[in-house]
Image (cartoon, grey):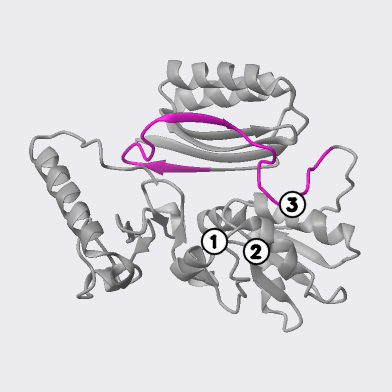
Amino acid sequence: MFEVVGFYKFVKISYLKKNQKVLLETLKKKNIRGTIIISKEGVNGTISGKAADIKFTINNLKKTFKFKEFNSNNKSKSLFQPFHKPKVKIKNEVVPMNLILNKRIKKKNSHVDPIKWNKLIKEKDTVLIDARKPFEYDVGTFKGAINPDVDNFRDFPKYLKKLKKNQPIAMFCTGGIRCEKASVYLENKGFNNIYQLNGGILNYLKKTNKKKSLWKGECFVFDNRISLKHGLKVGSYSMCSGCRKPVSRKDKKSKKYEEGVSCPNCHDNLTDHQKSRFRMRQKQINLAKEAGKRHIFQKEY
């Protein structure tokens, strides 16, 4: 059993290249896989490994960057290692929005726990916004949620400008970090009634009984589990090798679905040459599986 931890913290970080090297060495030493992003404004990541190794790595991370707790962190379990290798990346922002957060920014406590969240989003005046990408929204979302249809989060402010300042706005995303930045942006623009789901969708699915839940569908995650259900159990989606988008059981019944080649989303956009190349790749993957090996063409999302 592997422990999977997603986390973020807005904290001033210096010596990025030096810390990148130190963190990567720790991940390799403890056989931890996943991705950690560091920038001058903070840290964001999802990693997986054995419980004791994860605990050591998290404590080491806090000690390195001199903070006691994350802004938010989510823990779940996986029967298999959902990542192929460890990565530590340096970025200008932990979440790209052309807005650098620092200690001088004053932000109201707008976090709403799952129980109060249900009451909030049932109110007719509340504008409920899914801050994720469109394909994530298609896998699952809250009833009545609006998706801005933005593929690049840097374009999210263009949508936010359309909102009315006097309306209650409730935002949610996978782990909470996108909403953290978006709420700061809105407060800077004079919005007062801003709320965000504490811990994101993953925290909601972990703590909310399915019978009382207002969530519909599954939650897409950026690792090889692909999607999670209530209780953070692995969902029913797989990944299309042609377009790298999630594939449902219904999609697999389509004539346009071919394992390792295409799905209804990309079938008509792929050339015959691409399909032929993907079929050859899938053949090699199948042969590797029969031999009990993992083929080099198998990718991590």
Q: Which residue is mark 1?
A: 208
How many labels, in total? 3
Judged from the image, the secondary structure of the residue bearing numbered disc 1 is loop
Q: Are marks 2 and 1 in contact (CB under 8 Å)?
A: yes
235 shown above or below 39: below
Q: Are marks 3 and 1 in contact (CB under 8 Å)?
A: no
Q: Toward the viewer: 95 or 141?
A: 95
Indicate the secondary structure of the residue bearing disc 2: helix
At 16% from the left and 55% from the top, the residue drawn is 279
Please give the label number shown on residue 181: 3
The image quadrant of residue 195 is: bottom right
- x, y percentage for residue 7? 60, 40
How many residues crowd mark 1 within 10 Å: few (<14), some (14–19), many (20+)? some
Left or right placement of residue 19 versus residue 293 in this view:
right
**Quadrant location of the N terminus in the rendered image:** top left
Q: Is residue 288 magenta?
A: no
Q: Amino acid at mark 1?
A: Thr
Coordinates of residue 222 in the picture (x, y in percent) = 46, 49
Q: Earlier in the sequence, mark 3 or mark 1?
A: 3
Q: Residue at x 79, y 70 (%)?
A: 161
Name the N-terminal-most of marks 3 and 2: 2
Quadrant position of residue 241: bottom left
Residue 75, percent from left and from top: 51, 42
Q: Residues within 10 Å of mark 3 (few under 14, many from 20)?
A: some
Q: Which residues are magenta?
A: 75-102
- Amino acid type, label 3: Lys
Q: Which residue is mark 2?
A: 115
Q: CA distance from mark 3 to mark 1?
A: 25 Å
On the rendered structure, is 118 left or right of 27?
A: right
**Can you give x and y, in whole percent of width and height, for residue 86 in the image?**
45, 29
- Name the one closer to the observer, 159 or 275: 275
